[in-house]
Amino acid sequence: MTENVISPAEPKYTRQTVLSSRIWSSEKLFSVRVTRDPAFEFIPGQFARLGLAILPSEPDIPTEWRAYSMVSHPEEDALEFFSVVVPDGKFSPALARLQAGDPLWIDKTSFGFLTLERFIDGEDLWLIATGTGLSAYLSMLQDPQTRLRFKRIIVVHGVQYAHELAYREDILRIGTKYAPNQLLYIPITSQEHTAPELSPALTSLTAPSRITTLLDDGELEHRVGIALDPSRSRIMLCGNPAMVADMRSRLTSMGFAPGRRGVAGNMAVENYW
Ligand SMILES: Cc1cc2nc3c(=O)[nH]c(=O)nc-3n(C[C@H](O)[C@H](O)[C@H](O)COP(=O)(O)OP(=O)(O)OC[C@H]3O[C@@H](n4cnc5c(N)ncnc54)[C@H](O)[C@@H]3O)c2cc1C
Ligand SMILES: NC(=O)c1ccc[n+]([C@@H]2O[C@H](COP(=O)([O-])OP(=O)(O)OC[C@H]3O[C@@H](n4cnc5c(N)ncnc54)[C@H](OP(=O)(O)O)[C@@H]3O)[C@@H](O)[C@H]2O)c1
């Protein structure tokens, strides 16, 4: 007679180790690099579920989980995440306190549909984000597929203050791998003037604004020098759900729509909360 042995279920996650962290804006924005399980696969634009052992009585059991987009490219050995600190949040302040050597648990599965696979064609790729919503695009920008598939890639990043324009220099550096003017970087600051030094795409000091306002008054297309056109523009929206909803309704009235079963779309969105 064979004994019925019940083996403990294999955990759905792996324990990784923090390699380094970087503060972008004191008390508010930081990024963290961690080791990567070689079996963890993802497509640029996808997110991971990160786990932290929050209970002091259970230092080796992750009890709190949150979604974070991968900033790093799938070919890198390490994973990088970019995060805001929500002062009274359960997760992000603890994530911000992590130091090299600390554990971070990562679900073995990657998730999400904010990937280039959402579009089957298109000439101009508009990657529009507020705050940490930029994370989802950083991996994509490093992917050769992005510059091979699209004639122009426009990164629009809306933040409150210029010092919150994290990864600005990285984006400009990545742009040197693209054809001249193929990658355009449009920073938008809502609580202070936007200085022209922030990007070669800006020509003068401009008043504080939001992405939605710049779309309404035609200034967004003017700064980019390209019109939004449902037949050739492909748009991603990521970050603050209010921005995503407000932009989505404006773009819908211009003829943009997400894909449906069997019908390719020209707009893809991801809300961060
Ligand atoms: C698909 C997906 C991907 C995500 N990727 C990222 C990422 O790459 N980087 C990141 O920082 N967060 C990301 N988030 C949000 C993240 O999962 C957490 O919600 C966030 O880090 C705050 O966690 P918390 O427990 O401290 O606060 P929570 O209790 O989770 O959130 C409290 C409040 O904080 C605000 N908030 C939450 N997230 C943000 C944010 N990112 N920026 C500004 N305000 C916020 C909202 O008002 C929210 O209601 C993502 C969320 C989703 C659903
Ligand atoms: N000093 C701080 O502010 C501070 C410090 C530590 C932590 N935090 C935490 O940081 C979080 C906020 O982070 P964040 O500033 O990166 O994110 P955010 O509040 O989403 O703001 C990012 C950008 O999106 C703009 N925006 C918001 N709603 C919009 C809409 N409907 N349409 C178009 N644009 C819109 C904002 O403009 P507006 O500026 O006009 O709203 C801002 O330029 C809060 O959860 C807070 O707890 C804040």
Image (cartoon, rainbow, N blue to C red):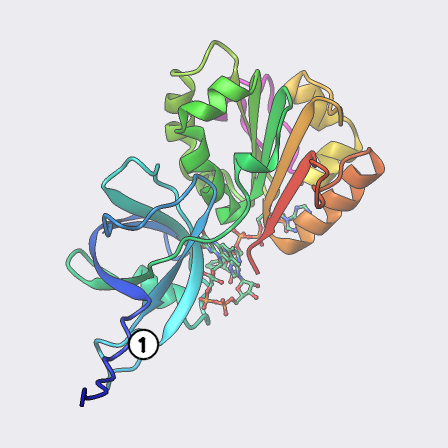
For residue 241: magenta? Answer: no
Q: Quadrant of the N terminus?
A: bottom left
Residue 44 at x, y = what percent?
43, 39
For residue 197: magenta? Answer: yes
Query: For the image shown, how many numbered marks are present on the structure?
Result: 1
Determine the main secondary structure of the stretch shown in magenta: loop
Q: Write the residue at 52% across / 15% down.
A: 182
- Magenta part of the protein: which range? 194-208
Q: Above or below — where is 205 with respect to 75? A: above
Q: Tell whether 113 sits left or right of 62.
A: right
Q: Above or below — where is 110 with respect to 103? A: above
Residue 250 at x, y = what percent?
79, 40
Residue 262 at x, y = what percent?
71, 40
SS at badge 1:
loop
Q: Tell whether 264 sits left or right of 238.
A: right
Residue 199 at x, y = what percent?
50, 23
